Amino acid sequence: WRHRRENLLIAGETGTGKTSSAAVVARKLAELEGKSIRYRLFRELISEWNGAKTSDSDSDRKFLERLGRIDLLIVDEVVGKRGERLSGSSQELLFELLDGVYRGQRKTLIWLLGNFYDGALDDMFFDPLPAKRRIEESFTSIWIDKTTKEIKTL
């Protein structure tokens, strides 16, 4: 709850409670502070992004503008299988989200949830350094320990 006004990268193994924890805090933000919140699995967000890019009446810029009007975007299951590289379009969308936060382009807070194992970003991006820099400078990274359920800020 103390990180509610920050961009977060919430990491931990499957079953640690990342999604449940984010949902509880998001619900409280909506109830107590009237925040507009959108939850999406990363694959759903990618599908919407690709749909906007190929639509005659929509575009990738309009899609990002719509996301920029909400208070909190929770993106779950960002990390796929170990060693799996994101598609070009998926890398583009994730980088757009990271870069928008980094440059202060959008008011939207972003919480990225996933099994961010050591080296995950290296596996996900062709060129991971710009993404890593944006996360390091603009996000608070939290690890939820599977055994103890302890939350550690990294």
Image: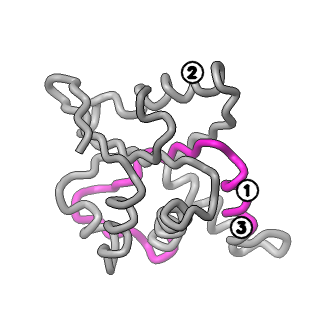
For residue 79, side relative to residue 72 (left or right): left
Name the residue carrying label 3: 52
Mark 2 or 1, nearer chain start: 2
The residue at 27%/30% (across/down) is 16
Assign the C terminus to one quadrant of the image.
Answer: top left
| Amino acid type at mark 2 | Lys
The residue mark sitting in front, 3 or 1, is: 1
Helix, strand or loop status at disc 3: helix
Q: Are marks 2 and 1 in contact (CB under 8 Å)?
A: no
For residue 148, side relative to residue 57 (left or right): left
- What is the magenta range? 62-90
The residue at 56%/61% (across/down) is 46
- Labels in figure, total: 3
Is 76 located above or below residue 93 in the figure? above
Mark 3 or 2, nearer chain start: 2
Image quarter of residue 119: bottom left
Helix, strand or loop status at disc 2: helix
Name the residue carrying label 1: 66
| Amino acid type at mark 3 | Ala
Residue farthest along the right direction in this orientation: 57
Mark 1 crowdedness (10 Å alpha carbons): few <14, some 14-19, many ≥20: few
Mark 3 or 1, nearer chain start: 3
Q: Are marks 3 and 1 in contact (CB under 8 Å)?
A: no
The residue mark sitting in front, 2 or 1, is: 2
